[in-house]
Image (cartoon, rainbow, N blue to C red):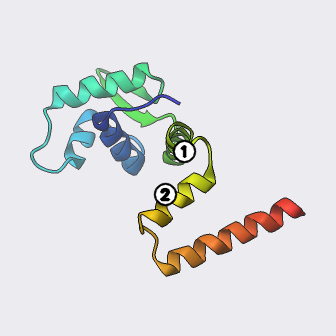
Amino acid sequence: MTELTKAEEKIMKILWDIEQGFIKDIQEQYPDPKPPYNSISTIVRVLVQKNIVDYHVYGNSHQYYPLISKEEYRKGQLSRLVSDYYNNSLKQVVNFFSESKKLDEKELDEVMKMLEKLKSQKNE
């Protein structure tokens, strides 16, 4: 999966939310101060070149829409993170969170239930 810059990710998040839109629609979703129209247009064209976004043509206007879902992108990013930084080891990921105290007791219980469910599915 292609990695996106922060600016590209911001535009993708907007497109995932609005599902499709013109550059002005994307610009309207930005908080103030909004980036210039041309800057957004340039980034969207890069996303088209990366085959992440496509468009419908209406006269001189282009209506853009994502070619990948937010879920697909999220899975790809998480897989890359686990691969690059945790040697594809769920154990190392869990160890990181447990050592950094980022999980509270309720979250730990939920994770344990998920792991037990996964384990029982693997044994079936």
Image vertical order of residue 76 relative to residue 121, above or below: above
Residue pointed to by mark 1: 86
- Which label sits on residue 96? 2
| Residue 75 percent across, percent down from the top left | 55, 45
* Circle 2 Cα neighbour tier, 10 Å, few/some/many (<14 / 14–19 / ≥20): few
Q: Residue at x 26, y 42 (%)?
A: 25
State the residue in front, 123 or 49. 123
Distance from disc 1 to disc 2, alpha carbons, whole Å, reads 9 Å
Q: Around disc 1, counting alpha carbons within 10 Å, would you say few (fewer than 14), some (14 to 19), or many (20 or more)?
A: some
Q: Is residue 58 visible?
A: no
The amino acid type of the residue labelled 2 equals Phe
Q: Position of residue 106 (x, y in %)?
A: 51, 80
Q: Would you say 66 lies left or right of 38 here?
A: right
Please tell me which residue is depicted at 54% across the width and 54% down the height of the picture: 93
Which quarter of the image is occupied by the C terminus?
bottom right
Pick the front one: 24 or 114: 114
Q: Is residue 40 visible?
A: yes
Percent from the top left, x then y, of residue 65? 43, 36
Q: Is residue 26 above or below residue 101?
A: above
Q: Residue furthest front?
A: 99
Q: Are marks 1 and 2 in contact (CB under 8 Å)?
A: yes
